[in-house]
Amino acid sequence: MSEPPAALRQITSELSGSLVGQPPNLGIEFVLSLQNNGNQEVKIADPLDSLFLRFATIGNKLITIPERLPKAVLNIKSGKENIPFPAAIEVRQIVHGASVRYQKEQFIRIAPGEKVQIVFDTQPIVMEKVNAAPQVEAERSVRSFKAKAGLVLLNAPPDTGGRSVESDWISLSF
């Protein structure tokens, strides 16, 4: 297996999240932050095209959420903007410095020292599955679960290469 491109090795990811809405219509708003700790600009393909979210109970039992194949695996060349993301999410905004965009982007540029934040909401199926997961007896009054993100950072064409990154687990309760 080849070494990932040097510029991509400088990108770190962090996931944060909060519950939004009121029961029974709770959802999760996530913020995926990508930080360029290197000294050169990085141009990557939209990371949400390869994003997978993992959910687990506090007792580490995985919560299965339906996912789709990533666009790269489907090998679709045109009309990508209409293909759903692999994770059960909806994009809300992309914060890039002082700029805020509300549409999906084909490529994202991250300057040295810069951070890009992608804000997205989960689809209702996520909370349905989290609510259906068994809870540890001591946790019955407060429902808690964990989430983490995994994604592949791909250099934007014409450059090649990629790197898998994962966030740490975050805990949420309701």
Image (cartoon, helix red, strand yellow):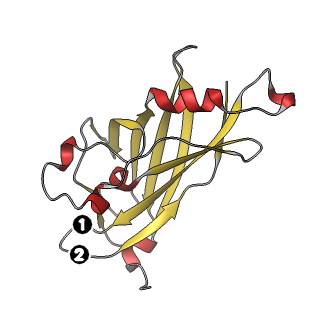
Which residue is the site of mark 1? 156
> Residue 110 lies in what quarter of the image?
bottom left
Q: Is residue 150 above or below residue 147?
A: below
Which residue is the site of mark 2? 159
Pointer 1 with pointer 2, Cβ within 8 A:
yes
* Residue 169 in picture, x, y percent from top left: 64, 50
Structural crowding at the residue carrying mark 2, measured as other residues with C-alpha within 10 Å and reported as few (<14), some (14–19) or many (≥20): few
Observer-nearest of 29 and 66: 66
Q: Residue furthest right?
A: 138
What's the residue at 41%, 46% (across, down)? 117
Structural crowding at the residue carrying mark 1, measured as other residues with C-alpha within 10 Å and reported as few (<14), some (14–19) or many (≥20): some
- What amino acid does circle 2 point to? Asp
Observer-nearest of 55 and 111: 55
- What amino acid does circle 1 point to? Ala
Quarter placement of the C terminus? top right
What's the residue at 33%, 52% (across, down)? 49
* Residue 167 in picture, x, y percent from top left: 56, 55
Observer-nearest of 78 and 16: 78
